[in-house]
Amino acid sequence: MSKFSALSKAKLAEQCLSELLRRGKAGLSPIDVNIRALTHASFLDGAGKFGSIAFPVDMNIFCIRHGIRIVSQSAPFTSVRGCKAIFKRYWLAELDAAKSAVSVLNSWRAKWGVRPLSKCSRDALLAAFQSRATIFGGVIL
């Protein structure tokens, strides 16, 4: 049996998609999602654990099930102890992808009986995507 209920998995997906929108073109990596502060990375160094395999799966689900265009690119990371790792950083490809993400969020919220994002909130989230995005070596998923 799954550790999380279907609703809690959906809420985690909502948080992830909301954060992807909030971060704009800066995007997210597994480190951003799984470690509260970079100082916590030193606790994980000894175990050799960085991030989670669930985060890239979530990004693929957003692309495949929901049709949201997400770009990824390798991003180096150095922990406070000097250990190095490479993670993929993911971000929404362009304004249309951000609008799709907002639509998905609002459809989830409607299913849960929660009001959709206000126009003000929606406009604030989409503002980061208003200028034309240029992709430098990123791969569109």
Image (cartoon, rainbow, N blue to C red):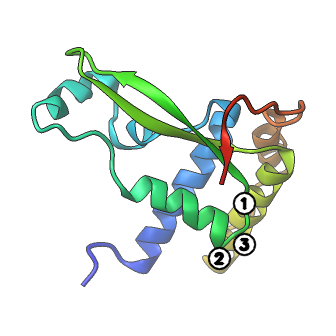
Give me the C-alpha separation between circle 2 and circle 1: 23 Å
Looking at the rendered structure, the secondary structure element under dot 2 is: loop
Of marks 3 and 2, the one in the foreground: 3
Of marks 1 and 3, the one in the foreground: 1
Give me the C-alpha separation between circle 1 and circle 3: 14 Å
Looking at the rendered structure, the secondary structure element under dot 3 is: helix
Count residues near mark 1 (Cα–Cα under 10 Å), then give few for <14, some for 14-19, many for 20+.
many
Of marks 2 and 1, the one in the foreground: 1
Q: Earlier in the sequence, mark 1 or mark 3?
A: 1
Q: Position of residue 12 (x, y in %)?
A: 46, 60
Picture disc at residue 68: 1
Q: Position of residue 97 (x, y in %)?
A: 79, 53
Q: Residue at x 60, y 36 (%)?
A: 27
Label pair 2/1, CB-CB below 8 angstroms: no
Relative to 104, say whether 95 is above or below.
above
Q: Position of residue 9 (x, y in %)?
A: 43, 69
Residue at image mark 2: 113
In front: 91, or 76?
76
Q: Which residue of the protein is positioned furthest toward the front in this rendering?
A: 137
Kindly indicate the quadrant of the structure image that contains residue 120. top right
Q: Position of residue 23 (x, y in %)?
A: 63, 35
Specify the amino acid type for callout 1. Ile
Q: Residue at x 32, y 36 (%)?
A: 35
Specify the amino acid type for callout 3. Ser
Looking at the rendered structure, the secondary structure element under dot 1 is: loop
Picture disc at residue 6: none
Q: Is residue 15 left or right of residue 78?
A: right
Q: Residue at x 86, y 52 (%)?
A: 96
Residue at image mark 3: 107
Q: Earlier in the sequence, mark 2 or mark 1?
A: 1
